[in-house]
Structure formats: C-alpha cells, structure tokens
Image (cartoon, rainbow, N blue to C red):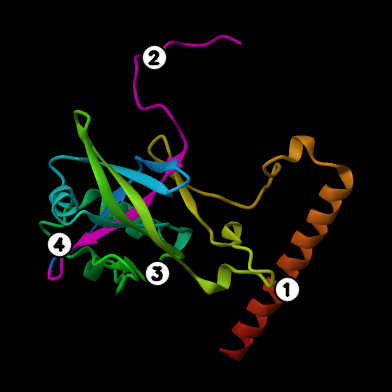
Amino acid sequence: MSKITFKPGTMLNPVPAVMVSCGDGDIKNIITIAWTGIINTDPPMTYVSVRKERYSHDIIKRTGEFVINLTTEDLAFATDYCGVRSGRDVDKFKEQKLTPQESKVVKCPSIAESPVNIECKVVEVKELGSHDMFMAEIVNVSVDEKLMDENGRLCLDEAGLIAYNHGHYFALKRNEIGRFGYSVMKPKTRKRLNAQRSRGSNKRHNSNSKTRRKK
C-alpha cells in the first residue's frame, strides 16, 4: 500500500457533530462542536474544545456548564447553521425553530429536538493554543423514550444520528459490522442476540406504524 505523507493536522475522522447549548438565564446560545469525546468512565467525563474568540467560549467559561445535544438527519441543517453563525448576531434557537428545554441539573437549556441531552459541569479548563479544552463531568443524561426498547435498552441506532467527516456531514445508517466483543463471541450467543435485535426492530416498527395511523 503506497501512502502520501501530510503535515501534522486534525486528520482524525469521522468525529461527532453535536450542538452544544449554553447560557446563564437571559443569555442562551448554541455552538456546533466536532472536537468532543469521552475521556473517563468513573466519574463519567467528557470535553469540548472551543476557540477563544467564539461567543460561547466566554459563556461556558463564566457559567461552568454546557449541554451536549446529539444531532440527527432532521437536525443537520440546524447543526450546520449553528456552526457558521455567531450568537452575537442571531438567536439560533429562534432562527432554527429549536426549543430551549429546561435541563434537569444544569441551569443552561437543552435542545428539546435532540434525542439525547448530556448535561455537563466544567471541572478544568486547559489552554491548548487555538482552542481551550473544557473538561467536564457528565451530571445527567436525558433520552427520548421512543429510543428505549421493551427491555430498557437504549437503541441509539434508531435515532438517525449524524457525524462529521472531512468537511461533510454523513448519516450513520444502520449497517452493523459487529458489536463489542463479536470477535470472540460464541456462535450460539451471536444467533441469540441477532434474534433479539430482529424482534426489537419489528416491534418498534409496528409501534411507529400504529402511531402514524392514529395521527
């Protein structure tokens, strides 16, 4: 395999495309973030890296709180808009018809249209150069109940999530290659899990069909 050498850069792809909401009462804003991820399990911790000149930077630094809102195909346009327009100039909630929803623990709003809202409290700020990294503890997670199956399992594969890859947004369509540990999974276990997943998908499909007929 022949390869071309690039200079060091942000070539790790794909990455999440999330809308981060922040605010302190009268002020509320949304910023689209790709530099985010999980950095610890216990306690659960995450981070967002924000350019110092961004409007949301000072809000998050001052309040010490933010909410990571997962994005979907339906939210793709709003996700892009919130990444290229500044909260200094426009009310992004209003312009994109997004609903600021009261969060469970933090004071800043969540985005009601997002299927998963991850509430965070900043524990450390690391100055890295172009960006400041806000390391935060996850203090609450709210999930759309329609994504839960009859066994209480979260089915994020049904949410229609999107990711960001080298300047473009992509839908994370269901095309599963395997699950964690599948390389050492016993055939009987694999067969059982596949059957459970198939039954769960059929039940959710039938439930959604009934809901559409009622409307």
Q: In the image, what residue type sits under mark 1?
A: Lys
- The residue at which mark 3 appears reads as 113
> Callout 3: 10 Å neighbours few (<14), some, many (20+)?
some
Label disc, if present, on residue 121 of the rendered structure: none
Disc 4 vs disc 2: Cβ atoms closer than 8 Å? no
Label disc, if present, on residue 90 of the rendered structure: 4
Q: CA distance from mark 4 to mark 1?
A: 42 Å
Q: Secondary structure at mark 4?
A: loop
- The residue at which mark 2 appears reads as 6
Residue 119, image quadrant: bottom left
Instruction: Determine if the magenta segment contains residue 57.
Output: no
- The residue at which mark 1 appears reads as 203
Q: Nearer the viewer, residue 132 or 41?
A: 41
Q: In the image, what residue type sits under mark 3?
A: Glu
Disc 3 vs disc 2: Cβ atoms closer than 8 Å? no
Depicted 3 relative to depicted 114: above or below: above
Q: What quarter of the picture does the N terminus occupy? A: top right
Q: CA distance from mark 1 to mark 2?
A: 48 Å
Q: Secondary structure at mark 3?
A: loop
Which residues fall within the magenta stretch? 1-26
Mark 1 and mark 2 lie on one chain; the one further toward the N terminus is 2
Q: Nearer the viewer, residue 73 or 203?
A: 203
Residue in view at x 12 percent, y 41 percent: 53
Mark 4 and mark 2 lie on one chain; the one further toward the N terminus is 2
Q: Secondary structure at mark 1?
A: helix
Mark 3 and mark 1 lie on one chain; the one further toward the N terminus is 3
Residue in view at x 33 percent, y 59 percent: 78
